[in-house]
Amino acid sequence: MSQVQRHPLAAQTAEVLLRRIRAGEWALGHKLPGETTLAAQLGVGRSTLREAIRELAGKGVLESRQGAGVFVTALDVVEDWDTVLRRADIITVIEARIAIEAEAAALAARRRTPADLRALWRALTARAEAGTSIEALVDADTAFHRTVIAAAHNDILTQMFDAFVPRIRHAMVDMLRIRPMADERADHHAHEVLVDAIRSRDPEAAATASRVHLNALRSAFEN
């Protein structure tokens, strides 16, 4: 059984608890042993244990419920989006975009309002008129895709997309400088197909259009 041997005790205790949770000793939703028992197992005082539990509660791993005990609410510490995205390679980010945007496109086809549709046509036109500047094209393309996400009327999806934007923008600009778009008209047509599917309230066609376009983007980075 893991025991704490070094200071600072509270941080070390939190780390031991986290290791035991990662190892599967306590499942998600499981109640930890009582404070006295757990403190004895770890070889620390109850005040140190309470401080360690507060630390893990602040990271979303544990939750203290008044009169009920301490429960496991996550099996590991979740890193913030910025940290995750900084470490992720561009292909991984595009794969995540496919998962998010294909579903968002389907939701947009079901939920879009007349105002959403007008915004989509404006974004599509702005994309077509972005000119020869690579930066302007990337920004117009990003704005278009965000308009699709907004039409899904799901704030979580919008926030997730916004987290991706800084990570994807620089890579897109760099790629287009090295490898200009082979067929701009075909690329723009792919976006028109997506808008038309959303206009027609066809979730399956919208999801497919989004997935096909982003898979082509992924292939461009892989080749």
Image: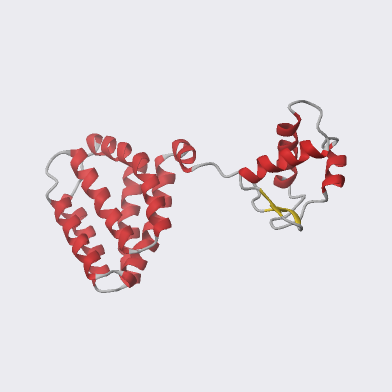
Looking at the image, residue 151 lies above or below residue 143? below
Give the quadrant of residue 200.
bottom left
Looking at the image, residue 152 lies above or below residue 98? below
- Image check: 125 left or right of 2? left
Query: Residue at the spot x=73%, y=27% of the render?
Result: 8
Residue 19 visible (yes or no): no
Query: Residue at the spot x=83%, y=36% of the render?
Result: 45
Residue 80 visible (yes or no): yes
Looking at the image, residue 117 lies above or below residue 26? below
Which residue, as the protein is rendered here, is positioned at the far front?
66
Name the residue nearer the viewer: 186 or 12: 12
Q: Residue 13 at x, y = what percent?
A: 75, 36
Q: Residue 164 at x, y = what percent?
A: 38, 45
Q: Residue 62 at x, y = what percent?
A: 68, 49
In this picture the colour scheme is: secondary structure
Name the residue nearer the viewer: 194 or 177: 194
Name the residue nearer the viewer: 110 or 8: 8
Looking at the image, residue 176 lies above or below residue 104? above
Q: Residue 78 at x, y = what percent?
A: 57, 45
Which residue, as the protein is rendered here, is positioned at the far top?
7
On the rendered image, what quadrant is the N terminus found in? top right
- Image check: 13 left or right of 165? right
Give the quadrant of residue 16.
top right
Number of numbered markers = 0
Query: Residue at the spot x=83%, y=44% of the render?
Result: 38
On the rendered image, what quadrant is the C terminus found in? top left
